[in-house]
Structure formats: C-alpha cells, structure tokens
C-alpha cells in the first residue's frame, strides 16, 4: 500500500493494470484483484487523476466549480479542503486539511481512522475560528456533500465550489500540499503510531506555514503572506 501510494503521486493516471505491473516489477507476488481491493481501501481511484474519496453520497447536492478563470488576489477569498491516505509502519490513517489558496497557509487539519464526516467538520470548525472565506472548494466526496458540512458553510454565507468529477487539478494547491507532506515527512520518517503521526504532521505543518519558502510567494513562507 505504501508503494501504491507513492506511485500514485507520481502517476495518478495509472489504471489498475499498470499499478499491478508496477508492483510485480518490485518482485511482489500479488494478483490484480488484490491491487484493486487495496486501491479502494486506500481511497485511490486510478481511472481519473483524483482520489476515490470524491464519490458523493446518493441524494446529496453537488455544487458547480466556481474557480475557472477566477483571479485569486486576497487572503480568505478561496479556501479548499481535501482528504488523503497516510501510510504508517503498521496500518494507515486519513488526513483532512484546509488551506487558503492565496497564501497557501494550512488553516487546520485532523486525522481519523475512518472516512466519517465528523473529522472534516472538526477541521472546518477550527478553520472558521481563524476567518471566513468567500468560497470553499472541495471534491464531491460524501463528507463534503453531506448536509452537515454544506449547511455549516451556507449558514455563514460562504459560496460552495466543488471540483468537476475526475479533475484532481481543480484543487491543485492542496494536491501539491499532499506531495510535499509525503515526500518531505511521511516517506522519510514513516510513523509507527497514530500519536507519532499526529506530532509529526503537527511539526511539519508548523514548518510548512512558518519556515518553508514557496516559489509562488516570492520565496516567503505562507504565514508572511497570510498575515501581511
């Protein structure tokens, strides 16, 4: 699963057959049915370049994507959220984060052992203590299309934007965040426990927000732009 996750970041366009071929070439004896099952367990869909976490719950309203051609020129203009799979030495957890598009500042995050909507709501409540965006963008996952999540946004007058199906690049900045987190922390220091993962992610996001320079921000860290 760790190898599949790492390869997915490099080649999200690989289908199950190509993923199976990749794993076999790593000298693992595993059939294609198990590859398919593991990808589903991890929440990865390789038909489209985006996580399978994007499947909406039946009956939930899907909102249009509002960011096409939109110029992002201020803090709190657009926030986005997404969920990713985090491998550990034994098992795995899920991580949700909320980011400001203009500053790339990570406003809040939570980890969970399930894809229940509660940890997404907790992250949203933490982020809203720091401000209020004009637009909130997510994928079409059941966590984000749930009434409890959308109603919390609508009650504050926040416009809801959702990625087109199968379009990972609609939420490109948070996809880049996952790449940075995994290659700069998770894959270098694979955590053994949930507590170790929690502290590791906390330290990484503190570094990411306050120290890590971003080329798109004129080599400033996100905090310098977010609170300018």
Image (spheres, rainbow, N blue to C red):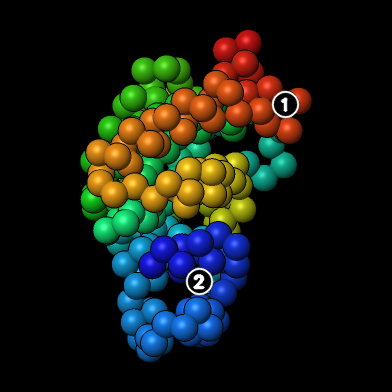
Q: Is residue 9 visible?
A: yes
Read off the residue under disc 1: 219
Q: Residue at x 27, y 58 (%)?
A: 90
Q: Residue 106: where, in percent of width, then height?
A: 49, 30
Front in this rendered view, residue 68 or 36: 36
Q: Residue at x 34, y 72 (%)?
A: 38
Read off the residue under disc 2: 46
Horizontal side, residue 25 vs residue 215: left or right: left
Kindly indicate whether the residue at mark 1 contacts the one at mark 2 (C-beta within 8 angstroms). Answer: no
Front in this rendered view, residue 199 or 129: 199
Where is the N terminus found, in terms of image quarters? bottom left
Image disc number at residue 190: none
Does 25 sit above or below residue 195? below
- Looking at this view, name the residue that lies furthest to the top: 228
Q: Residue 72: where, in percent of width, then height?
A: 67, 30
For the residue carrying disc 1, how many other residues have a C-alpha within 10 Å: few (<14), some (14-19), or many (20+)? few
Q: Residue at x 39, y 50 (%)?
A: 190
Say which label, 2 or 1, has the lower sequence index: 2
Q: Secondary structure at mark 2?
A: loop
Q: CA distance from mark 2 to mark 1?
A: 33 Å
- Looking at this view, name the residue that lies furthest to the right: 218
Does 67 sit above or below residue 5? above
Q: Secondary structure at mark 1?
A: loop
Q: Residue at x 45, y 40 (%)?
A: 81
Q: Is residue 142 visible?
A: no
Horizontal side, residue 44 vs residue 115: left or right: right
Q: Residue 162: where, in percent of width, then height?
A: 50, 48
For the residue carrying disc 2, how many other residues have a C-alpha within 10 Å: few (<14), some (14-19), or many (20+)? many
Front in this rendered view, residue 115 or 35: 35
């Amino acid at each position: 699963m760790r190898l599949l996750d790492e390869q997915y970041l490099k080649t999200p366009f690989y289908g199950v057959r190509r993923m199976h071929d990749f794993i076999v070439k790593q000298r693992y004896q595993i059939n294609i049915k198990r590859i398919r099952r593991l990808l589903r367990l991890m929440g990865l869909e390789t038909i489209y370049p985006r996580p399978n976490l994007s499947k909406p719950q039946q009956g939930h309203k899907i909102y249009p994507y509002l960011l096409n051609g939109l110029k992002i020129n201020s803090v709190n203009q657009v926030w986005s959220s997404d969920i990713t799979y985090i491998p550990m030495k034994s098992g795995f957890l899920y991580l949700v984060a909320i980011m400001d598009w203009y500053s790339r500042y990570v406003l809040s995050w939570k980890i969970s052992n399930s894809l229940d909507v509660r940890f997404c709501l907790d992250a949203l409540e933490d982020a809203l203590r720091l401000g209020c965006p004009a637009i909130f963008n997510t994928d079409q996952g059941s966590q984000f299309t749930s009434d409890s999540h959308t109603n919390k946004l609508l009650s504050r007058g926040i416009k809801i934007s959702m990625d087109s199906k199968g379009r990972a690049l609609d939420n490109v900045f948070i996809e880049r965040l996952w790449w940075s987190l995994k290659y700069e922390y998770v894959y270098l220091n694979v955590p053994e426990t949930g507590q170790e993962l929690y502290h590791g992610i906390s330290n990484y996001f503190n570094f990411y927000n306050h120290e890590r320079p971003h080329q798109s921000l004129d080599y400033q860290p996100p905090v310098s732009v977010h609170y300018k």
